[in-house]
Image (cartoon, helix red, strand yellow):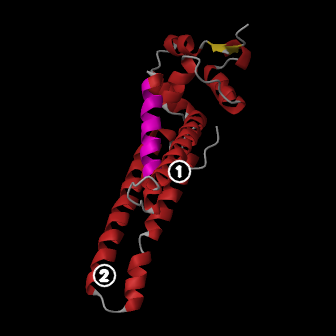
Amino acid sequence: MRNQLKELRAVRGMTQGALADALNVSRQTVNALETGRYDPSLPLAFSIAKLFELRIEEIFQPEN
Amino acid sequence: MPTASSVPVRNAGRSYLLEFCAVLALYVLAIVARDWAVAHVADPNLVLAAKAAPVLPIWLAFFVVVRHYRRIDEYERLRMLKELSIAFGLTSCALISYSLLMDAGLPPLAITWAWPTLAASWGLTRAIFSIAER
């Protein structure tokens, strides 16, 4: 999957650490999500969507 | 995302380090106490208890790792399980290789080497994973 996490974070002026704290995950996890090395579980995807007040599909899209 | 502990994920590493260092210190203390008791204590029951004492910190170390696993987030859990899988494979191969090489003349190795070998393999795997992620 690809995602807009990095762009959304940048728009809100958040650091990776601040986003990690808001989601209660590690900064390494945020980095792995942003670089596409890790696709989140549904509960984490919902937490991210809730934080950015968007729908999951507005943040995460299939590669093809 | 549900975690099994009230400790924020951000603090999980520090808590783990503190707990693991405490258990390691307990292990060293138990080893020292065991050796001292064997040399200086006459009561066979006390000597037996001292000889068994290092077992406790070994099990505590296991529970510290499990506790850490329950504190970290889903990505770190996945990474930890991958690291442990590879470390388990490395440890198994290393110990079986050594046991076969003992037939070729290498000195006998105590079974207690399994634990530090696994710890070293895990550390090596973790370092490789960390470098690969940069």
Determine the chain carrying the residue at label 1.
Answer: B
* Residue placed under numbered mark 2 in the picture: B37
Residue B29 versus residue A63: which sits nearer the camera?
A: B29
Residue B32, position in %: x, y? 29, 71
Kindly check if marks 2 and 1 are in contact, taking CB atoms under 8 A apart as contact: no
Q: Which callout, 2 or 1, points to the residue nearer the camera?
A: 1
Residue A1, position in %: x, y? 68, 15
Q: Is residue B52 visible?
A: yes
Residue B76, position in %: x, y? 55, 36
Residue appearing at x 59%, y 17% in the figure: A36
Q: How far apart are marks 2 and 1 (CA)?
A: 34 Å
Mark on residue B96?
Answer: 1
- Report the amino acid beneath label 2: Ala
Q: Can residue B7 be seen in this view?
A: no
Work out whether B109 lies above or below B53. above
- Report the amino acid beneath label 1: Ile
Residue extending furthest front? B104
Q: Decide whether residue A11 is among the magenta residues.
A: no
- Residue A38 vs residue B113: left or right? right
Q: Decide whether residue B126 is among the magenta residues.
A: yes
Residue B50 versus residue A15: which sits nearer the camera?
A: B50
Splitting the image into 4 quarters, where does residue B134 fall? top left
Magenta segment range?
Answer: B117-131
Residue B100 versus residue B64: which sits nearer the camera?
A: B100
Work out whether B62 lies above or below B76. below
Residue B24, position in %: x, y? 37, 59
